[in-house]
Image: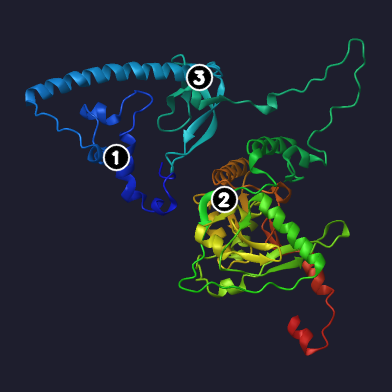
């Protein structure tokens, strides 16, 4: 309900909370059919709208009533209200039960059976996670079981069936092959499903480490399958933060359009049309304006020269107040990852574009082309404080997970000393990213690696090494012969 308030009022939610609760208690509840105030006081309250209505209609004043008659009438009304409320609530419960039972299936467990248990996370009472396996000790009721949690304090607990799910030991599963009667079985053994080089298709493009065993790869595939919606080429949109641009009392900055060749104009028109269809930009009437430039991409497909759409925000950045939020130190992150035995890296899908702009900031990101005047609705590249905003978002998402995760902007790494811990750590990080509404580019993810390329270094296995390609570039560097070349080196 607080999120339903206008954006300007949302920041004053603590002041408006009593008014919001009053309005909530002034509306009839579907379950009982009465206004909460009626069940509490025996009569409706006179809220702001009621007072305004009475002021317009000028109702007659109610005659004075004896206190004894009022109390007796109140008791009678309260008894009648409670009777009707109980009847309405029972009917509402039966209706909800009918809807629930249409697809509900009663799950039965036997004593000695292994199960997963949904338990609250210790630091966060409102956050749950699955733990196990645990053992069913006894069936206590139709939907309750006594479970041995194996803890030192209060090891036996009675849990509802909704907090349990069966545990399957994958080592006990057997693969069978059916043949027609009389047909001889082939002597070739069953293929190793996990030794195929096409493992990427099993996990939607995510690269699994070659050093992992078949069982470990099976664990990864099942884990990633539970977060399949998280891996997408379509950018997500987070509601955890929005980018603002503080320019103080500065006047709007308006720059002239750069002169572009004809073939570049067509490319700009196509890029703007794509962003309009994706909802990333919209038509603008802003007094701010920045020019557009196209920069060749370093890696082109099929030998074709591709261009990157950019906006020159240097004029806007000069009048923007600096956001001093720190960016993670690359050297410290590399040192942290070096000692890990298992490493996984993730890269967000167009990370900057997953952050919305505030209404005031949209107008300041306006850019001009030959075809018109537009403004961004998501955080574009080139803004002065964009890295600080993105680093703040990632730090917020990974808060509490710093012991096994690190991030430099959208490059997220998960590190662990054992495989079992690594699976738990991956689950926690992926769950945090999913709650934030972010998406990950599967083709840039690596899972369970012993060594990974991170921030221009090869790290892992107690080692830190520069990339061989960068070393070779220096080896092949042509000796300098002029002062200008020395300065460039």
- Marks 1 & 2, CB-CB < 8 Å contact: no
Which residue occupies the foreground of this view, 325 or 222? 325
Disc 2: CA contacts within 10 A as few (<14), some (14-19) or many (>=20): many
224 with respect to 129 (left or right): right
Residue carrying label 3: 99
Q: Residue furthest top?
A: 181
Per the image, label 2 sits on a secondary structure element best described as: loop
Which coloring applies here? rainbow
Residue carrying label 1: 49
Q: Gap between marks 2 and 3, in whole Å? A: 43 Å
- Marks 3 & 1, CB-CB < 8 Å contact: no
Place of residue 1 in the rendered image (x, y in percent of width and height, measured from the top left): 41, 41
Q: Gap between marks 3 and 1, in whole Å? A: 36 Å
139 with respect to 198 (left or right): left
Q: What's the residue at 88%, 60% (across, down)?
A: 303
Per the image, label 3 sits on a secondary structure element best described as: helix
Q: Is residue 435 visible?
A: yes
Q: Is residue 452 visible?
A: no
Q: Gap between marks 1 and 2, in whole Å? A: 54 Å
Disc 3: CA contacts within 10 A as few (<14), some (14-19) or many (>=20): few
Residue 302, compared with residue 112, is above or below; it is below
Disc 1: CA contacts within 10 A as few (<14), some (14-19) or many (>=20): few
Which residue occupies the foreground of this view, 73 or 425? 73
Label 1 vs 2, first from the N-terminus = 1
Instruction: Return the mark for residue 404.
Output: 2
């Amino acid at each position: 309900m607080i999120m339903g308030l206008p954006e300007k009022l949302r920041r004053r939610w603590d002041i408006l909370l009593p008014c919001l609760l009053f309005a909530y208690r002034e509306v009839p509840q579907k379950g009982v059919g009465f206004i909460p105030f009626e069940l509490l006081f025996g009569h409706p309250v006179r809220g702001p709208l009621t007072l305004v209505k009475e002021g317009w209609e000028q109702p007659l004043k109610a005659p004075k009533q004896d206190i004894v008659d009022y109390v007796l009438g109140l008791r009678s009304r309260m008894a009648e209200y409670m009777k009707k409320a109980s009847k309405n609530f029972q009917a509402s419960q039966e209706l909800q039960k009918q809807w629930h039972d249409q697809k509900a299936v009663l799950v039965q467990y036997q004593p000695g059976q292994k199960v997963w248990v949904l338990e609250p996370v210790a630091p966060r009472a409102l956050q749950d996670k699955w733990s196990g396996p645990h053992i069913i000790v006894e069936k206590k009721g139709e939907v309750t079981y006594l479970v041995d949690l194996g803890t030192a304090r209060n090891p036996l607990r009675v849990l509802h069936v909704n907090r349990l799910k069966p545990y399957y030991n994958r080592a006990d599963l057997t693969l069978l092959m059916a043949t027609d009667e009389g047909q001889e079985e082939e002597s070739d053994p069953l293929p190793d499903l996990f030794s195929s080089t096409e493992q990427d298709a099993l996990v939607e493009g995510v690269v699994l480490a070659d050093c992992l065993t078949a069982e470990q790869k099976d664990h990864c595939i099942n884990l990633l399958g539970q977060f399949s919606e998280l891996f997408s080429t379509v950018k997500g949109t987070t509601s955890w933060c929005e980018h603002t641009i503080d320019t103080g009392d500065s006047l709007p900055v308006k720059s002239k359009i750069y002169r572009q060749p004809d073939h570049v104009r067509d490319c700009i028109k196509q890029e703007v049309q794509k962003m309009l269809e994706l909802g990333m930009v919209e038509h603008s009437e802003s007094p701010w304006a920045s020019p557009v430039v196209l920069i060749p991409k370093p890696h082109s497909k099929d030998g074709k020269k591709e261009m990157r759409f950019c906006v020159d925000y240097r004029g806007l950045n000069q009048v923007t107040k600096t956001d001093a939020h720190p960016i993670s130190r690359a050297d410290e992150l590399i040192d942290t990852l070096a000692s890990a035995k298992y490493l996984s890296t993730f890269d967000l899908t167009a990370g900057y574009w997953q952050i919305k702009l505030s209404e005031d900031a949209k107008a300041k990101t306006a850019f001009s082309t030959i075809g018109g005047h537009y403004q961004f609705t998501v955080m574009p590249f080139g803004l002065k404080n964009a890295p600080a905003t993105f680093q703040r978002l990632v730090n917020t998402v990974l808060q509490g997970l710093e012991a096994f995760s690190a991030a430099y902007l959208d490059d997220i790494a998960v590190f662990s000393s054992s495989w079992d811990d690594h699976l738990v750590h991956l689950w926690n990080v992926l769950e945090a990213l999913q709650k934030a509404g972010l998406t990950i580019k599967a083709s840039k993810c690596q899972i369970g690696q012993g060594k990974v390329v991170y921030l221009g270094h090869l790290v892992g296995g107690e080692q830190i090494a520069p990339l061989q390609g960068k070393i070779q570039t220096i080896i092949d560097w042509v000796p300098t012969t002029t002062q200008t070349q020395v300065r460039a080196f």
